[in-house]
Amino acid sequence: MPLVPAHALRAESSAVQPTSAQDDTALQEAMSVLQKGHRGIKKRMGDLVVNQSALLEILSGMESATLRAMGKTPYGPEGLSEKDNALFLVAYRQEMAKLLVQILALQQATWQGDAQAFEAAYTELGSIKKAGHAVSRDF
């Protein structure tokens, strides 16, 4: 099932651009929370039991930031056609959805005290981050 309905791909180009500087700032703030959270997890992943509370707080913040970021429309690279701009938005939201899934997997591993699952989800989180940034560069 697609994350964005087909009619959104046929929308006017203004539908896939941020509507205001405020939207852009909110997106940047959400991304900053995600970046800081990623670093915070790395510092605390050595002992899930001792750091459970701190990790869950970080992950909860990252979950909220991801949901806020998914609701924002980032600027696509300059010079894109209307269709490519719409495809950029779809790719952005797909990568954010993958990120959310991994954050939830990290939360579950933290609750369960499963260090192996936590490490695997953290590694995947890094891969998703790299892939998401590559999507921006590839367009």
Image (spheres, rainbow, N blue to C red):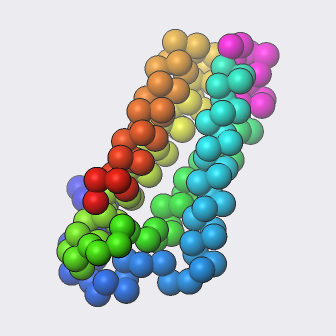
User: What's the residue at 55%, 21% (across, down)?
Assistant: 118
User: What's the residue at 66%, 60% (across, down)?
Assistant: 29
2 to 24, vertically: above or below? above
Residue 127 visible in the current orientation: yes
Q: Quadrant of residue 65?
A: bottom right
110 to 2, vertically: above or below? above
Residue 60 visible in the current orientation: no
Q: Quadrant of the N terminus?
A: bottom left
Residue 36: x and y in percent read 68, 42
Q: Nearer the viewer, residue 105 or 33?
A: 33
Residue 136: x and y in percent read 37, 56
123 to 130, vertically: above or below? above
Left or right: residue 1 versus residue 70 is: left
User: What's the residue at 28%, 53% (across, down)?
Assistant: 138
Q: Is residue 98 magenta?
A: no
Left or right: residue 22 versus residue 2 is: right
Residue 113: x and y in percent read 63, 16
Dominant SS type (magenta): loop
Residue 126: x and y in percent read 48, 32
- Magenta stretch? 46-55
Left or right: residue 42 versus residue 92 is: right
Q: Quadrant of the C terminus?
A: bottom left
Q: Nearer the viewer, residue 7 or 26?
A: 26
Q: Nearer the viewer, residue 98 or 34?
A: 34
User: What's the residue at 48%, 34% (across, down)?
Assistant: 125
Q: Nearer the viewer, residue 35 or 105?
A: 35
